[in-house]
């Protein structure tokens, strides 16, 4: 069901959706289901707590761990929860555990099953699965850290996701001490690529030209939404000259637009000091 509605969106069959409605969050899942099947049918099939789970209003991972603890067989239980809630919801919760606390409280048998599930979805070419696997490999949680493979996962997630994909997921903002934020899948994969290129100047497979290409894609997004984290990442690409010649004037323009975001403000002040006339510079 969840794959079905996402396919509809990617094919453009949901023209009534607008950016403002998308940004409202979990309520959107129910609205799309009602659009596909009618409100009466959805109301009868999604009841009580199950309805809340599907719309993402409850964090169910602790319930899942309790289920495994009581009944065993983590692989079987994860398959049951996937069939009930859909693999996107499961991936979102796995990603949340990775970002919030590095999955430190998850037992080894459950960790192995979760990692295998993510790997299986990534092997199928699922863009969300590829993104989560990239996070796992980049941070070295559940798998040996491998920046080259993490990069490949993000690249493939970028190529396989559509700009019409409305999948919301968690994004770790390394610019603000790993702060947890939400982003759509297409933007999150591109932001992860740029962030890797900034934080890791060298690793196998790093492709500066591709970084600049996805930066250009994100530049169209900030024309209508001055998101600080996006402006910071774009500014750093220009400032550091990733895939292009360094252009600190363009970097400053990005930082200036996003100065309510602390990292943008810090970089703007740094460059402003560099460009200030000699008699105005601090001793």
Image (cartoon, rainbow, N blue to C red):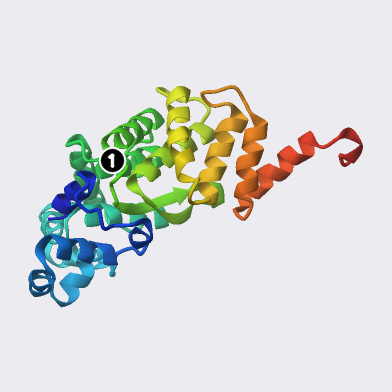
Residue 179 in the image: state x and y as whole percent. 49, 55
Q: Residue at x 68, y 47 (%)?
A: 266
The answer to whether any part of residue 190 appears in the image is yes
Which residue extends farthest bottom? 48
Q: Position of 53 compared to 182: left or right?
A: left
Question: In the figure, is residue 68 to the left or right of 144?
Answer: left
Residue depicted at 55% across the width and 50% down the height: 228
Residue tagged 1: 162
Q: Quadrant of the C terminus?
A: top right
User: Residue sitting at 53 percent across and 38 percent down?
Assistant: 234
Q: Position of residue 57 (x, y in %)?
A: 28, 69
Q: Quadrant of residue 158?
A: top left
Q: Is residue 87 left or right of residue 181?
A: left
**Mark 1 element type:** loop
Of the pair 16 and 181, the residue shown nearer to us = 16
Does residue 102 show up? no
Binning the other alpha carbons within 10 Å of mark 1 as few (below 14), some (14 to 19) or many (20 upward) gives some
**Above or below 44: residue 268:** above
Quarter location, residue 282? top right
How many marks are shown on the rendered structure? 1
* Residue in the foreground of this view, choosing between 194 and 78: 194
Above or below — where is 189 with respect to 81?
above
In percent of width and height, residue 241 lies at 58, 26
x and y percentages locating residue 247 in the rendered image: 63, 28
- Quarter holding the N terminus is bottom left
Q: Residue at x 29, y 64 (%)?
A: 26
Query: Residue placed farthest to the front in the image?
Result: 15
Q: In terms of depth relative to the viewer, which is nearer, 198 or 4? A: 4
């Amino acid at each position: 069901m969840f794959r079905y509605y996402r396919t509809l969106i990617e094919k453009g069959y949901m023209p009534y959706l607008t950016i403002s409605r998308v940004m409202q969050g979990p309520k959107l899942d129910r609205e799309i289901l009602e659009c596909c099947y009618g409100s009466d049918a959805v109301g009868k099939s999604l009841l009580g707590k199950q309805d809340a789970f599907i719309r993402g209003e409850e964090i169910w991972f602790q319930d899942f761990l309790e289920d495994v603890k009581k009944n065993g067989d983590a692989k079987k239980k994860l398959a049951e929860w996937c069939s009930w809630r859909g693999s996107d919801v499961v991936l979102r919760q796995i990603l949340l555990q990775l970002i919030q606390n590095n999955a430190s409280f998850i037992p080894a048998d459950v960790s192995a099953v979760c990692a295998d599930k993510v790997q299986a979805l990534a092997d199928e070419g699922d863009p969300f699965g590829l993104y989560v696997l990239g996070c796992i490999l980049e941070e070295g949680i559940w798998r040996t850290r491998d920046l080259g493979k993490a990069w490949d996962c993000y690249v493939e997630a970028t190529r396989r996701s559509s700009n019409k994909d409305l999948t919301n997921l968690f994004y770790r903002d390394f610019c603000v001490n790993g702060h947890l934020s939400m982003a759509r899948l297409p933007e999150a994969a591109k932001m992860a690529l740029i962030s890797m290129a900034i934080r890791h100047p060298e690793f196998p497979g790093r492709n500066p030209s591709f970084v600049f290409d996805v930066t250009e894609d994100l530049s169209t997004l900030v024309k209508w939404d001055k998101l600080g984290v996006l402006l910071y990442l774009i500014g750093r690409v220009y400032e550091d000259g990733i895939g292009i010649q360094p252009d600190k004037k363009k970097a400053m323009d990005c930082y200036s637009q996003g100065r309510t975001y602390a990292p943008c403000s810090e970089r703007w002040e740094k460059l402003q000091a560099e460009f200030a006339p000699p008699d105005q510079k601090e001793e």
